[in-house]
Image (tube, coloured by chain):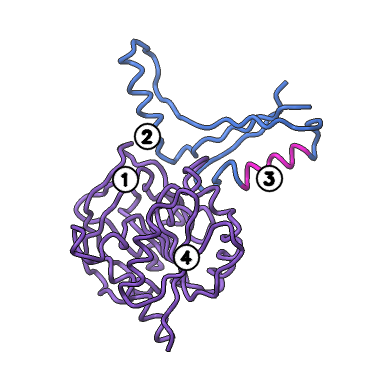
Amino acid sequence: MSAARVGVVTFPGTLDDQDAARAVRLVGAEAVPLWHGDHDLKGVDAVFLPGGFSYGDYLRCGAISRFAPLMEELIPAARAGLPVLGTCNGFQILCEAHLLPGALTRNASLHYVCRDQRVRIESTATAWTNAFAEGQEITLPVKHGEGRYVASAETLAALEAGGQVVVRYVGGNPNGAMNDIAGIRNEAGNVVGLMPHPEHAVEELVGAPSTDGLGFFTSILKKLVNA
Amino acid sequence: MARVIVDVMLKPEILDPQGQAIARALPRLGFSGVSAVRQGKRFEIELEGPADEAAIADVRKMAETLLANTVIEDYTVRVEA
């Protein structure tokens, strides 16, 4: 069969698109560049929304990006089941687009945090985490100033009850996120957002803390090949 | 021509660490008697026409759609006299 095609979106101010595309290629999938200004998903099988500072984080992180022409295509596609992963700024965009509940706000410490972070995989029932074991602890880089996950008490309770918390910080919460939440999924499990960066932890050569991030990419490959 | 003001504030239950940092700085600068500070955003919307009911409804829609994230923020709309 032809290689699975994973779209990687670039907005003005996106930083991590090249790392994301590289990680996609490392697991044997094809990385398809997608441009924020196009009304075109190029028929991809999944989409990666990378980190950075899209539109300069003006107004709120992700607030402008969610109205980009590409997002007008992506939002209905994601609602219809297209697998989408957003990391860092990508997570913020998914929340602003209401594809995921809640919001990401200024770190409680007010400091930008850049460190290797221990996290636990809480849900493997997603397109992006099925290659992990439930409860598995991994180490990924975090780097953000606005990563404190907040949601209403009812939303939090629903996320916890429905197993929609996908990744949780362990060994210290870098931003004050409610319930130590690092990442969540939608009800269907095709849309996942997290603050840590799996795409920065795929190769030993570059001094990443681990290659634990690879699991997110092997997960989507497994999902697409078995589809 | 009219100016409509939209004030956007974090909901009361959402932690505002920036406001807290400002509140902590005030006593160091010699200001006393402040029990809390909340930080928000103010938008000044210049209308081409009058601030009639339809225009205000439009501004509310702008606030709802873009200016505020109603998951975490409240907004108020008023016409500047």
Q: Nearer the viewer, residue B72 or A44?
A: A44
Q: Which residues are magenta?
A: B55-65
Residue B62 within the magenta-colored segment of the rendering: yes
Q: Which chain is represented by purple in the image?
A: A
- Per the rendering, the mark at residue A33 is 4
Proximity of marks 4 and 3: CB atoms separated by less than 8 Å: no
Residue A71 pos. (x, y %): 56, 60
Distance between the alpha carbons at the discs numbered 1 and 3: 32 Å
Residue tagged by mark 1? A176
Q: Quadrant of residue A19?
A: bottom left
Residue B74 pos. (x, y %): 56, 39
Instruction: Answer few, some or many: residues within 10 Å of disc 3's Cα (few below 14, many 20 plus, some between 14 and 19).
Output: few
User: Compared to B17, does A155 lie above or below?
Assistant: below
User: Compared to A224, does A158 lie above or below?
Assistant: above
User: Identity of the amino acid at label 2?
Assistant: Pro
Q: Chain of mark 2?
A: B
* Chain B tint in image: blue
Residue tagged by mark 3? B61
